[in-house]
Image: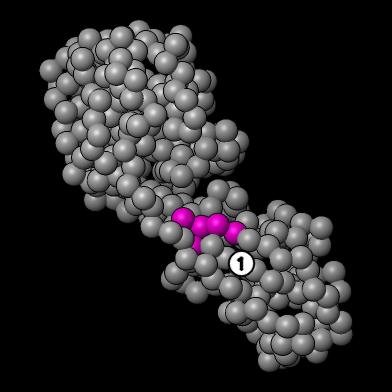
Amino acid sequence: MALDQTALKLLVNWFPECRREMPWRTDPSPYHVWVSEVMLQQTRVDTVIPYYERFIAALPDPEALAACPQDALMKLWEGLGYYSRVRHMQEAAAVMVREHGGQVPDSMEALRKLPGIGSYTAGAVLSIAFHRPVPVVDGNVLRVVSRLNGSFEDVRSQSVRKRMEGTLAGLLSEGELDPSTVNQALMELGALVCIPNGQPKCGSCPVRGRCEAHLRGLTEEIPVLSPRIPKKNALLTVLVLRRGNLFGVVKRPGKGLLSGLYGFPVSEGRLSEAEASGAARALGFRVVSSERLRPARHVFTHLVWEMDAYLLNVEGDCPDVRFVTPDELADRIALPAAFRKWPELF
């Protein structure tokens, strides 16, 4: 037993009855599929849905996305993280407007030339929106296929992923099944039944009779995952500058982590309260009072910020610091989640 046309037919029959309702499935236009797939990168479906609905309501097509002011775009994305994703989306939308008549292109070559679109996203757009026989291999699919095939190969290996993509491409090309349904069914099975954490729900699986891992009692051993590289820790001190009812934010550098976004001033290392006040004075402020805030932690993909923080009531001004109201922080300024660890202040 292994992944074959029979298994795919069983999945295609299972999918319509068991699939989750998602707004991009209601209207799977190329633009909608593209936006949803970018948002879903390293983000849960339940988290994405309200962001997707707001985003599409505000920016219904590539032309609107390309023309959106940067601050408004960042505000729409606020809370999703990985802000480079939406920057690349806007750059890609500008190319669509300029070179493709404002439409998402329908070829792998054209899609791969767009900023931020790799083989996975291109495959999702081509198969789901254009019904092309292109594989879409994510973590869910890697797990499902490894268990079906009883494979002990490391699914984090790029060579294993490439071979799996080749196998799926061959099956999609030789069969009469809709590639859109096949790819979504494989992903959905991995999300709902052949789950990543805990015991797979084999009793609900439409292909359990063809699954080598299930038949041989190997579901706890497959898939094989090589160890992840440990995240690095960075020790930082956050300066929450308050002047009256205004808060001071700075625009971060154009490159690097959280590039181009607003945040509170940050100093490397763990500063004492006196040192934090000194850092504020170095910016040109007079410190009226200071208060240590509770420590906070924020996890990025490859990095963890361990943050000490101080609320510093200040007087004066600094050309690099913009003072904004709590309403502006709520409605207009995209403040990354790393800097929203102290919501009681705003």
Chain part drawn in magenta:
298-303
Q: Which color scheme is applied? A: one colour
Q: Secondary structure at mark 1?
A: strand
Do we see residue 57 in this rendering?
no
Residue 262 spot, x, y in % from top left: 60, 67
Check the image and report above or below for 132 versus 343: above
Q: Residue at x 46, y 55 (%)?
A: 301
Q: Nearer the viewer, residue 14 or 218?
A: 218
Residue 302 among magenta residues = yes
Query: Which one is in front, 63 or 236?
Result: 236
Q: Residues within 10 Å of mark 1 (few under 14, many from 20)?
A: some
Front in this rendered view, residue 101 or 95: 95
Determine if residue 173 is in view: yes
Which quadrant does the C terminus fall into?
A: bottom right
Q: Residue at x 44, y 23 (%)?
A: 200
Kind of residue indicated by mark 1 = Glu
For this rendering, which residue is in front, 102 or 153? 153
Quadrant location of the N terminus?
A: top left
Give the x, y percent position of residue 44: 52, 37
Looking at this view, name the residue that lies furthest to the front: 217
> What residue does disc 1 label?
306
241 relative position to 91: left or right: right
Instruction: Give the image location of residue 174, x and y in percent.
Output: 12, 17
The total of numbered circles placed on residues is 1
Q: Is residue 285 magenta?
A: no
Q: Going 69% across and 59% down the picture, which residue do you hit?
A: 340
Position of 265 relative to 137 (above/below):
below
Identify the residue at image location x=16%, y=33%.
Answer: 166
> In the visual, does 286 lie left or right of 300?
right
Left or right placement of residue 152 versus residue 264 in this view: left
Where is residue 261? Give x, y as percent: 56, 65
Vertical relation: 99 (above or below) 70: above
